[in-house]
Amino acid sequence: MNLLNKEAPKVASSLKEYEKDVFEWSVAGVPYRPLPRGGFDIEQRLKDMKASDVDMQVLSNTPQTFLYNQDAGLTTATSIIQNNQIAKHVRDYPKNFYGIATLPMQAPKAAADELKRSITKLNLKGAQIGSDAVQLLGGHGYVKEYPVERWYRDLRSAGVIEGGLLV
């Protein structure tokens, strides 16, 4: 959270506890609630996993950090920050976590490049894409600047899609 605030002050976040160990986290004015302490405190998450007899979890970003409504450069930068942090936790606790990336879906080439980097360099297992990206990319009969076909073309050219399947 602090790194996002430092690197992307335009979408600065705030964290507010409203019950013991339960928080509301707002990013760019969009709240995410409830966020348990284990959602941002890795040591607490490990304790919660142990108490629940969970050995492995998949780490991802929270929905309000997709930032599809923001400038593509900003969203690309925040995707990189978040993916690097997810990868750090996976490296630090490889027996407990897998990770999936977030992508700047309003910038298909940047999204393809970040997906390739996240899988090949950060060892993340895939990506999480918000449902509003379907509209952004031209799904459900709605066409905007970047149709789905362009995004898939960019993924193929980045070497992420082989033979029509995501690698």
Image (cartoon, rainbow, N blue to C red):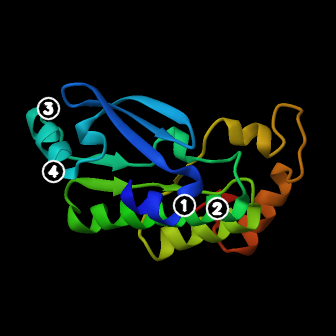
Q: Nearer the viewer, residue 22 or 128?
A: 22
**Which label sits in the foreground, 4 or 1?**
1
Mark 1 or mark 2: which comes first in sequence? Answer: 1
Q: Earlier in the sequence, mark 3 or mark 2?
A: 3
Look at mark 3 in the image and give the residue it sits on: 52
Where does residue 114 sit, x and y in percent of width and height? 59, 68
Q: CA distance from mark 2 to mark 4?
A: 29 Å
> Mark 3: which amino acid?
Ser
Determine the CA span between mark 3 and mark 2: 37 Å
The tag earlier along the polypeptide, 2 or 4, is 4
Q: Are the two marked residues, 2 and 4, in contact with CB atoms closer than 8 angstroms?
A: no
Q: Residues within 10 Å of mark 2 (few under 14, many from 20)?
A: some
**Position of residue 159 in the picture relative to residue 30 (left or right):** right
Image mark for residue 43: 4
Q: Which residue is mark 2?
A: 74
The three-letter code of the residue at mark 4 reads Glu
Secondary structure state at the residue bearing disc 3: loop
Give the quarter of the figure containing the C terminus: bottom right
Task: Give left or right: position of 109 versus 79.
Answer: right
Q: Position of residue 64 (x, y in %)?
A: 54, 40
Give me the disc on residue 8.
1
Of residues 25 and 103, the one drawn nearer to the viewer in this rendering: 25
Residue at 20% x, 44% y is 45
Taking the spot 23% from the left edge, 48% from the top edge, the residue there is 41
Which of the two labelled residues, at mark 4 and mark 1, occupies the earlier sequence position?
Answer: 1
Mark 4 Cα-neighbour bin, 10 Å: few <14, some 14–19, many ≥20: few
